[in-house]
Image (tube, grey):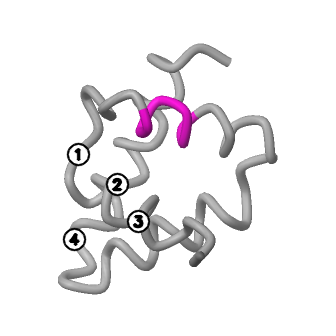
Amino acid sequence: MSPDKLVMMANQIGAFFASQGPDGSKGVADHIKSFWDPRMRAGIFEHLDKGGEGLKPIVVQALESLRPKP
């Protein structure tokens, strides 16, 4: 799936969960973890690692919380 499509989808999820208040990024993270297949997650992390152009802050925060801790 193209990075543009992944960004669009992630931002749509972010827009929905933004209305949940400060815990919105947790909802985004839970959704991506539960419903995105591993290839989609790998693609969005690759995009984030290249600067994350176009991703909303709530999505970036959610993705960072999903990263494995060293």
Q: Which residues are magenta?
A: 44-49
Check the image and report above or below for 21 versus 56: below
Residue under numbered circle 4: 19
Q: Are marks 2 and 3 in contact (CB under 8 Å)?
A: yes
Quarter of the image for the N terminus: give it. top right
The residue at which mark 2 appears reads as 59
* Secondary element at tag 4: loop
Q: Nearer the viewer, residue 53 or 69?
A: 69
Label 2 vs label 3: CA separation?
5 Å
Give the spatial CA distance, label 2 vs label 4.
Answer: 13 Å
What residue is shown with label 3? 62
Residue that sits furthest to the front in the current view: 70
CA separation in Å, label 3 and label 1:
10 Å
Question: Which kind of residue does numbered mark 4 sit on?
Answer: Ser
Foreground mark, 3 or 4, reads 3
Query: Which residue is at 45% across, 17% downward?
Result: 4
Q: Nearer the viewer, mark 1 or mark 4?
A: 1
Residue at image location 27% in from the left, 27% down from the top: 53
Image-based side of 35 in relation to 18, left or right: right
Q: Which amino acid type is shown beneath numbered disc 2?
A: Val
Question: In the shown orientation, is residue 25 left or right of residue 27?
Answer: left
Q: Are marks 1 and 2 in contact (CB under 8 Å)?
A: yes
Position of the C terminus by quadrant: bottom right
| Magenta-colored stretch includes residue 46 | yes
What residue did someone put label 1 on? 56
* Residue at image location 67% in from the left, 65% down from the top: 33
